[in-house]
Image (cartoon, helix red, strand yellow):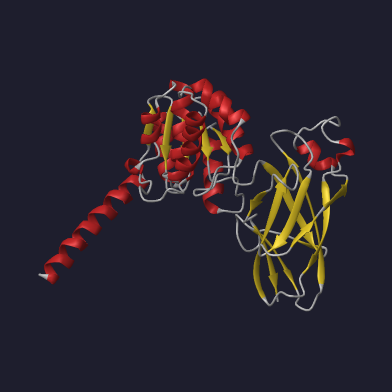
Amino acid sequence: MKKKFIFIAAIILLMCSAVYGLYLFTVHPVIKNSIYRSAQLSGNNLQKNINTYHFKSIINLRGEAPKKKWYKTESNISKKNNVKLYDVRLSAYKFPVVTEVDSLVHILQTAEKPILLHCQSGADRAGLASALAIALEKDASLTDIETQISWKYFVNPFNSQSTGKLFFSAYERFLHENGLTHNRENLLSWIKNDYIDHKGNIEFAIDYADNERFDHSRSEDRRSVVIRKGLNKIVLKGWAFDYRRKMPIKYFSISVAGKMYSSVQFSVDRPGVAAYYNLDKKDFENFKFGWVADMDIKHLEKGCYTLSFQVGDDSKSIRRVEDTGYDLFIK
């Protein structure tokens, strides 16, 4: 009996693997002749589907990755076929960053169609983008929106942290709390005025730790720096501002391993950052949103520590960001 059960389970597993393998190589219509979704396609498969569907635009939801083979292949094929490639970096399991949501909405509204949108597996990030696409283009119902972020597209039904589920669950809570019903206008208004991402709508970077630059050497999605053990303190340097309101941050503190928080001093001009975000001088007086912080690390042993921060309008409205995507290695 036990052997029979194992045999049946193995057959089911093989069948599921085959179905999922087929799914990974398939382009799925979201809106026929307009929006399509997929996983990361091989070069040959991408070319074949461009020939079939005559895509004019591709939205890559994995973000720009010029050193990666898959990105070089996709970029070259896009150029060869005169297809516009848009890069939007989303996380599969976090609230999407507000700047990327704004960018995605703009692209979906302005890019030439038909559009192919994809992430790595074609599930979580592609689901969020597909749900936004049908909401914007067809004013789709919440039921139809939820289909795009469901098990039908291999979104894990038991994982509430899928980015599409997080995003639209927050939107539905907003509707309920304000006595509103869903429509395209209310969705766009919420995105523009009320949506808060996992960083608290803060744009920021941590540039240096004791003049050692944080870089991507260990991971595409994280930055890290190595500091030798034995130092009593280090000086961290970076910048931050409230992206949605285009305002300086009044309360900001940073920590190693979420323990002792050190307040930062906003005292450094960062005109390059201001130019990148198209900010005017009226938005920031002298662009002083570069910061410096002294960090006590004498209590830390050798190892890897994630940097976190607290941010708010004042000490009574603090939001905590546990994982900034920056790691400190002490050797």
Query: Which image quadrant for residue 328?
Result: bottom right
* Observer-nearest of 2 and 297: 297
- The quarter of the picture where the N terminus appears is bottom left
Residue at (82, 44) in percent of width and height: 289
Q: Image check: 180 left or right of 254?
A: left
Vertical order, 208 against 56 (above or below): below
Q: Image check: 209 left or right of 4?
A: right
Query: Which image quadrant for residue 221?
Result: bottom right
* Observer-nearest of 159 and 10: 159
Vertical order, 48 against 140 (above or below): below
Residue at (20, 62) in percent of width and height: 9
In percent of width and height, residue 245 lies at 72, 33
In percent of width and height, residue 70 lies at 51, 50
* Observer-nearest of 134 and 34: 134
- The quarter of the picture where the C terminus appears is bottom right
Vertical order, 56 against 46 (above or below): above
Query: Which image quadrant for residue 329?
Result: bottom right
Residue 116 shows in the view: no
* Observer-nearest of 260 and 70: 260
Residue at (32, 41) in percent of width and height: 152
Residue 124 shows in the view: yes
Q: Image check: 13 left or right of 34?
A: left
In percent of width and height, residue 120 lies at 46, 48
Residue at the farthest front position: 316
Vertical order, 110 against 213 (above or below): above
In percent of width and height, residue 209 lies at 78, 63
Number of callouts: 0
